[in-house]
Image (cartoon, helix red, strand yellow):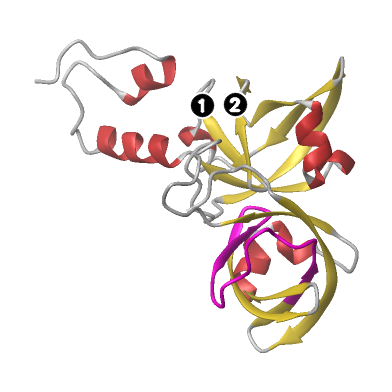
Amino acid sequence: MFTGIIQKIGVVAELQEREGGKRLWLKTSAWERDYESGESIAVNGVCLTLADRRADELGFDVLEETLRKTNLGGLSTGSRVNLERALRYGDALGGHLVSGHVDARGRVRSIQAVGPDRRVEITAPADVLPHLIPQGSIACDGISLTVAELFEDAFAVHLIPTTLTDTCWGGMKEGDAINLEGDLVCKIVRREAAQGRLAKDWSWEKFQEGVQPTTNE
């Protein structure tokens, strides 16, 4: 489990072909605590297992399914990626609960400067949009962001200068593929609503609108 607060930026050092996928080598600066063999690290929001190390590089085995479904399949030597190590008990939950299981890829539709900030519209598949609510959370390339606006085929987020500086999104451009993971809490509530297990005067539509139930009966 992750929190969507990016800790490091990694740079692709090498991509090695292997049966069933690729070995991804990332170069990054050292964390304060040492690595553990087999630990989980989110790479652009994708939960990967640390398989090997060499000098200041981390090695991950990426399956063909993951390469196909996420933007890791479009990486090349020199590509920059967002990194976050898994939460430990007692760690601060600075963003929101992120599983590292990407739902789908979106595309950057537009980037607009708003003072020092950026407003970014991202198109999303039809099976992702129903899990989003205005002012709710979404993980984009592993970054915990707030859904500022919702459209029929897309959503908008706002990026502050810190996000542009501390993540690989500083070099974002229109057309870029983005890994999307909807908010786990929204997914659970939507499933409960579909199963009829919410309060009788409540619905998923009311949840999206921020309406509170009046009874738990």
Residue extending farthest to the front is 32
157 on left or right of 94: right
- Disc assigned to residue 136: 1
Relative vertical location of residue 209 with respect to residue 147 in this rendering, above or below: above
Q: Which amino acid does the dot numbered 2 rest on?
A: Val
Tell me the tag on residue 147. 2
Q: Quadrant of the C terminus?
A: top left
Q: Which residue is pictured at 54% across the width and 44% down the height? A: 3
What residue is rendered at 49% in x and 46% in y? 91
Q: Residue at position x 83%, y 67% from top? A: 12
Percent from the top left, x then y, of residue 50?
61, 73
Q: Amino acid at mark 1?
A: Gly
**Of 1 and 16, the residue lying toward us:** 1
Location of residue 176 in the rendering, given as x and y in whole percent from the top left corner: 81, 46
Determine whether label 2 and label 1 are within 8 Å by CB: yes
Q: Which residues are magenta?
A: 24-47
User: Please, what secondary structure does the residue beneath circle 1 have?
Assistant: loop
- Residue 199 appears in which quarter of the rendering? top left
